[in-house]
Amino acid sequence: MSAGENRLILLLEGYFGHLYTADYHFYVADAFGLYCIDPTGTVCWHNDQLGIDGVIIDRFDGANLFGQGEWDPPGAWKNSVLDKQTGKKID
């Protein structure tokens, strides 16, 4: 693929929140969740159960990512830990 070529068109839920990069992947946060995208533009996983008005990643740590989702705006953020391979919550 060359520069200027679309690799992915991603329809987000609610609004675009943030873009993160780690371990050769892109992580796109929207109002409700998070997408993990590989360098070819393939969506590896999507978790849309992380918040109702915003999702942020605080840090990447080994096999996990740590973040927050806002569940009761304004200001009611709840922490989450996700498996980076699957996007599933870890209790």
Image (spheres, rainbow, N blue to C red):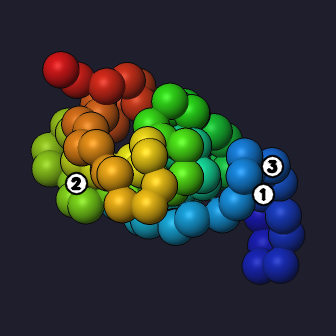
Q: Are there few (<14), some (14-19), or many (20+) residues within 10 Å of tag 3? A: few
10 sits left or right of 16 in the view: right
Residue 22 percent across, percent down from the top left: 35, 60
Q: Are there few (<14), some (14-19), or many (20+) residues within 10 Å of tag 2? A: some
- Residue at image point 14% right, 44% down: 62
Asked where in the image residue 32 lies, by quadrant, the reply is: top right
| Amino acid at pointer 2 | Phe
Q: Are there few (<14), some (14-19), or many (20+) residues within 10 Å of tag 1? A: few
Structural distance between the alpha carbons of marks 2 and 1: 24 Å
- Residue at image point 23% right, 36% down: 81
Q: Secondary structure at mark 2?
A: strand
Asked where in the image residue 59 lies, by quadrant, the reply is: bottom left
Question: Which quarter of the figure is the N terminus placed in?
Answer: bottom right
30 sits left or right of 2 in the view: left
Q: Secondary structure at mark 3?
A: loop
Question: Which quarter of the figure is the C terminus placed in?
Answer: top left
The numbered disc on residue 29 is none
Mark closer to the chain start, 3 or 2: 3
Mark closer to the chain start, 2 or 1: 1
Q: Which residue is mark 1?
A: 7
Residue 78 position (above or below residue 20): above
- In front: mark 3 or mark 2? 3
Contact? badges 3 and 2 (CB < 8 Å): no
Of the pair 81 and 7, the residue shown nearer to us? 81
- Residue at image point 29% right, 30% down: 83
| Amino acid at pointer 3 | Leu
Residue 14 percent across, percent down from the top left: 72, 52
Q: Which residue is mark 3?
A: 11
